[in-house]
Amino acid sequence: MNRSDRRRLEKEFKKVLSTAGDCCGLCGKALEHNSKTFGGFVTGSQITLAGECCVNKMVSVMASGVYVTENIDSIPRIKPNIKSSHVTQEGVATAIASIQSHFTTLDKMSDRVMRQAGIKGQPNNVYLGEIPWKADDSDWFKAHPNRSHRMRPIYSGEAVTLSKELIIPPPLENHRYEILVRQVEVGKRIRTVFCRNTKAYIPDEEEVIHAIFDIVSRSGTTGVLTFNEVEALAVRYNISLSAKPH
């Protein structure tokens, strides 16, 4: 490929990724998480992004990558073991395989943690780096080794990390959003959001927070969380919510 074509590819391919980067440009099929993608030319010098489904229809493949929809904050940095700016096809294939292996490992781990936590549905983002709310949870559970659940204030900007589909309206009067955290094992935790009534006393007891987490995270749960509902479940965890604060 000459320099002119290379510059055109670099410029136009960015537009393709930003406007139609979620599907194969040849058949329109939605790209799957952790699947290989290919950029280059098709008939008529058209530049497109293709999935594995249509890569054989391309005239020239000039770029390769991996399409991911989950855990995108943890994309690994791949450093090719080369001494020049030229990257071989084998080097690209090795890098792509390493990225896919990374996300396969994360996906399996998150699926396992979800099952252990008793949570149904698809897992959302897995955060591996140091983030304020993550460090807070880690420190808290280290200081409370006998606890598996906690309720805490929500951090600024944390809501968008819970789910892409999550919409949080302004809280009602005398209500505020808090985060419920379940530690499945050391270093592996699941969070969900909870809008609490600030006038209702919630004892910071493992069985109580455990019960609230179970109810809130239950698939399809909406509406008001009642005292009787929480107490009925908490009693099974050997505590009564009738106890007065002291």
Image (tube, rainbow, N blue to C red):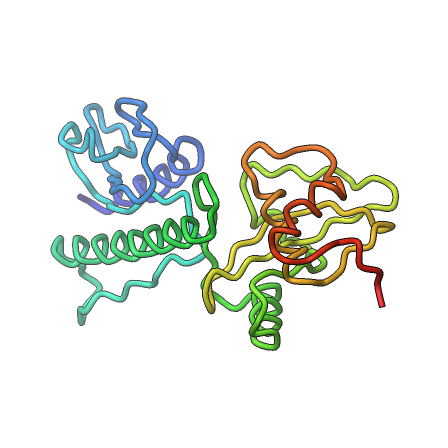
Q: Residue at x 38, y 33 (%)?
A: 22
Q: Is residue 176 above or below residue 221?
A: below
Q: Is residue 223 above or below residue 137?
A: above
Coordinates of residue 41 in the picture (x, y in percent): 22, 33
Coordinates of residue 134 in the picture (x, y in percent): 56, 65
Q: State the quadrant of the C terminus.
A: bottom right
Report the side of 26 relative to 117 (left or right). left
Report the side of 42 relative to 146 (left or right). left
Coordinates of residue 222 in the picture (x, y in percent): 66, 33
Q: How many marks?
A: 0
Q: Nearer the viewer, residue 26 or 31?
A: 31
Report the side of 87 relative to 192 (left or right). left
Q: Quadrant of residue 25?
A: top left
Q: Residue at x 62, y 69 (%)?
A: 136
Q: Is residue 30 above or below residue 40?
A: above
Coordinates of residue 139 in the picture (x, y in percent): 59, 74
Q: Residue at x 16, y 53 (%)?
A: 93
Q: Nearer the viewer, residue 190 or 130?
A: 190
Q: Quadrant of residue 1?
A: top left
For this orientation, the residue located farthest to the bottom is 143
Q: Nearer the viewer, residue 140 or 52?
A: 140
Report the side of 32 relative to 159 (left or right). left
